[in-house]
Amino acid sequence: MRRTERYSAKGSANSLWHIYKTVPFLKVTKNFIVIQISRYTPFIPMKNFLFRTFLKMEVGQKTSFALMVMPDVMFPERIKIGDNSVIGYNTTILAHEYLIDEYRIGDVVIGKNVLVGANTTILPGIEIGDGAIVSAASLVNCDIPAGAFAGGNPVKIIFTKEEMAARTKKDMIE
């Protein structure tokens, strides 16, 4: 189960209909503008500056966001990414989800030296451990342990850290 906080949506409309009761309109507007600028800029240090300064995301040193990465527009401050990680092209990192009768908010923690492939979606309440690799076009709906190689929709562990080490050792012997 993902680590999310659940809030009931009261009234006759779905939870997204009441969005500005959960997050201020001006915050969403500012975040949207900053994210759109960052999605198109080819300058990685500028993206990191925008994310740290205006979105209050925790972004590690030498972390790289590829073109078109979309961090959560409503709760980007709930995203933490470690040093030297790569977030691939057009990846979406969500810290919220609005449902019919409730909405959920959860921290997303991506470790150090993590590679997230292009077109991946990371759901709220997820942790991706240090040194993990997530293949392109994955839906990350559960935690990924440190050093693992995972992929798919929904994501599955393809190799654990130990299996990858054994495989590398075997390849070196041959």
Image: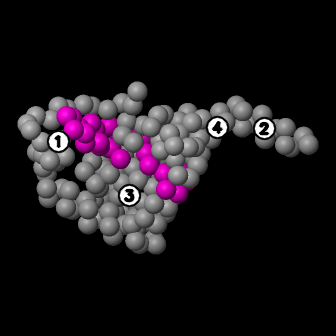
Tell me where residue 161 appears, x and y as whole percent. 66, 34
Give the residue pinned by disc 4.
158
Q: Earlier in the sequence, mark 3 or mark 2?
A: 3
Highlighted magenta segment, given as a residue range: 94-122
Q: Which residue is mark 2?
A: 167
Q: Residue at x 55, y 33 (%)?
A: 145
How far apart are labels 3 and 4 at the CA level?
A: 26 Å
Q: Secondary structure at mark 1?
A: loop
Percent position of residue 54, x then y? 27, 59
100 to the left or right of 129: left
The percent coordinates of residue 117 (x first, y second) are: 55, 53
Mark before the other along the chain sequence, 1 or 4: 1
Query: Mark 3 against mark 4, which lies toward the viewer?
Result: 4
**Disc 1 to disc 2, how far (Cα)?**
49 Å
Counting residues from the start of the chain, the first of labels 2 and 4 encountered is 4
**C-alpha span from label 3 to label 1:** 24 Å
Could you give the CA–CA distance between mark 1 and mark 4, rounded to whole angstroms?
A: 37 Å
